[in-house]
Image: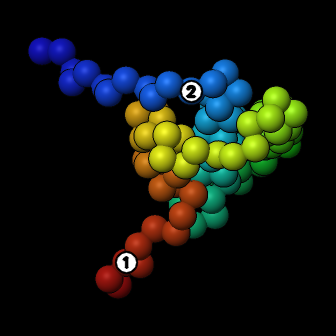
Amino acid sequence: MLPPELPPLPALTRAEAELIDRYLDVVDLLGRINPALDGDTYRGLRAAQALVGKATALRDALAVMHHRGETELHAGTLARALRVLDGERRTARVTLPPESAS
């Protein structure tokens, strides 16, 4: 049986697609660094080291958009793209987990 087909990505400019990709790169690394989740310090250290480069790429993606005259973020469209790319699960790793009952 085949997995369910994902909805198509909304139409994005090349700069918007780059912004989404770089944003998710940063989110993934922040999720690995999150001290509220189980893990080891070495994994967090490696993610923090990589974060510098990914944050720079995110800044550059936004700068390209700005220089091209794309001065507004179309939140609805970008949110749909994030959902298609599993953004809800990926960003959930950045937040605090619910408190345990113990």
For the residue pair 33 and 53, the one nearer the viewer reads as 53
For the residue pair 95 and 74, the one nearer the viewer reads as 74
Picture disc at residue 14: none
Q: Quadrant of the C terminus?
A: bottom left
Q: Quadrant of residue 56?
A: top right
Residue farthest to the front, as pictured = 69
Residue farthest to the top, as pictured = 1
The residue at the point 43 percent across, 47 percent down is 89
Q: Amino acid at mark 1?
A: Ser
* Sequence-first disc among 2 and 1: 2
Q: Position of residue 39 (x, y in %)?
A: 58, 53
Q: Quadrant of residue 46?
A: top right
Picture disc at residue 12: 2
The residue at the point 76 percent across, 44 percent down is 71
Q: Position of residue 44 (x, y in %)?
A: 70, 50
For the residue pair 3 and 63, the one nearer the viewer reads as 63
Q: Position of residue 21 (x, y in %)?
A: 63, 31
What's the CA distance linking mark 2 and mark 1? 40 Å
Element at label 1: loop
